[in-house]
Image (cartoon, rainbow, N blue to C red):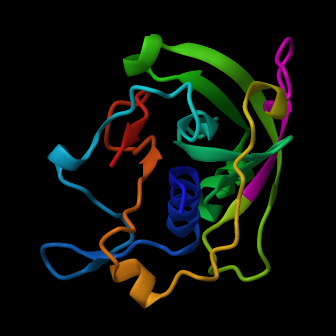
């Protein structure tokens, strides 16, 4: 499988399958973690597949990661999109500070959220519109090419050649640095 498809599958799995770990006191936590050595800044945020990864900012002060999946659509988590219930949001595509300096490629207002009918699925699609003097999303980057992931099973997940590449803006790190693991 090509790197880009593996990357998109990993992103979708992060959004659809809630990652679960045990804390030190054996309490369930919905936050995935990686050691400091496994997390590092992305140096090619202007190239696929990293260029579809953007940052959502909400008037609540909350920020999160979103992925361009269409002409005016962003894929993110339901718990992220729920911030629209208390205010407004925007989405920015930008070069990573560790790439060529921070440069905003596009800025968009979040206008609505679409949720799956099952309220337990932590996924949402956000509709956006370009802010003044900004191009539509699909004119800035090619949206993710989401393929069929029906072949993923326990055997596939345990095959050593199938490694996932994860990218985003984790809340416990530098706010404007796109990281990968």
Q: Position of residue 51 (x, y in %)?
A: 59, 33
Q: Residue furthest bottom?
A: 154
Q: Is residue 83 depicted above or below 121 in this figure?
A: above
Closer-to-camera residue (15/43): 43
At horizontal 62% and vertical 81% (from top left) the residue drawn is 120
Which of the 4 image quarters holds residue 42?
top left
Which of the 4 image quarters holds residue 137?
top right
Closer-to-camera residue (89/153): 153
Q: Position of residue 50 (x, y in %)?
A: 53, 37
For the magenta stretch, what is the residue range?
125-137
Q: Position of residue 94 (x, y in %)?
A: 58, 23
Horizontal arrangement in the rendering, residue 63 relative to residue 166 (left or right): right
Residue 153 lies in the magenta-colored region: no
Horizontal arrangement in the rendering, residue 39 relative to residue 114 (left or right): left
Which of the 4 image quarters holds residue 116?
bottom right
Q: Is residue 163 depicted above or below 103 in this figure?
A: below
Closer-to-camera residue (47/101): 47
Residue 126 lies in the magenta-colored region: yes
Horizontal arrangement in the rendering, residue 25 relative to residue 19 (left or right): left
Q: Position of residue 14 (x, y in %)?
A: 50, 64
At horizontal 70% and vertical 48% (from top left) the residue drawn is 144
At horizontal 29% and vertical 74% (from top left) the residue drawn is 21
């Amino acid at each position: 499988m090509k790197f880009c498809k593996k990357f998109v599958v990993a992103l979708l799995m992060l959004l659809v399958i809630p990652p679960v770990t045990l804390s030190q006191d054996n309490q369930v936590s919905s936050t995935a973690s990686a050691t400091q050595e496994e997390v590092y800044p992305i140096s090619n945020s202007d190239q696929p597949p990293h260029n579809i990864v953007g940052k959502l900012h909400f008037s609540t002060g909350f920020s999160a990661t979103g992925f361009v999946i269409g002409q005016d659509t962003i894929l993110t988590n339901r718990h992220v999109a729920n911030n629209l219930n208390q205010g407004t949001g925007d989405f920015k595509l930008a070069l990573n500070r560790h790439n060529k300096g921070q440069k905003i490629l596009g800025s968009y207002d979040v206008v609505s959220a679409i949720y799956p009918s099952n309220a337990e699925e932590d996924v949402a699609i956000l509709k956006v519109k370009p802010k003044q003097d900004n191009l539509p999303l699909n004119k800035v980057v090619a949206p993710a090419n989401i393929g069929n992931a029906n072949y993923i099973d326990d055997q596939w997940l345990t095959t050593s050649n199938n490694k996932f590449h994860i990218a985003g803006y984790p809340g416990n790190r530098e706010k404007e640095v796109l990281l990968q693991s």
